[in-house]
Amino acid sequence: MARTYRAVLRGNQLEWLDSPPPQPNALEVRVAIIEGETDELPAGRGQVMAKALAEPAARGAFSSISDPVAWQRELRQERNLMRRDPDATPSSPPASHTP
């Protein structure tokens, strides 16, 4: 089954305009060159993110967060991951919770 994803080809690299496709180790693709399109490319993802975060940052919205990684884990209630967290076991509770 073929699915369509929008991208820009720069040299030998594809730059995804939307969410990239899920990728196993290797992914075979077929690229169709679309000529004559006049759509402007969206601003880079980093520029969009910086603009979205500028106002809350100016208000000091994140200044009370001393450990951003711990804050994100608690917010998302992440579980320990065996390959990421050295002390993780298959039955480890989420990193932000203490028994």
Image (cartoon, rainbow, N blue to C red):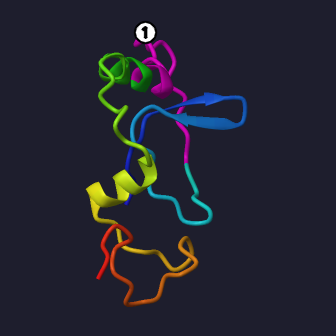
- Residue 43 position (above or below residue 28): above
Disc 1 residue type?
Answer: Thr
| Residue depicted at x 44% and y 52% | 69
Q: Whole-percent x and y of residue 1?
A: 37, 60
Placement of 48 over or under 88, stated as above or below: above
Determine the image quadrant of residue 86: bottom right
Rendering coords of residue 35 (x, y %): 51, 18
Q: Start and end of the magenta stretch?
A: 30-48
Circle 1 packing at 10 Å, graded few (<14), some (14-19), many (20+), is few
For disc 1, the marked residue is 38
- Magenta: main secondary structure equals loop
Q: Residue at x 34, y 37 (%)?
A: 64
The percent coordinates of residue 41 (x first, y second) are 46, 17
Residue most toward the right? 11
Left or right: 37 in relation to 83: left
44 drawn magenta: yes
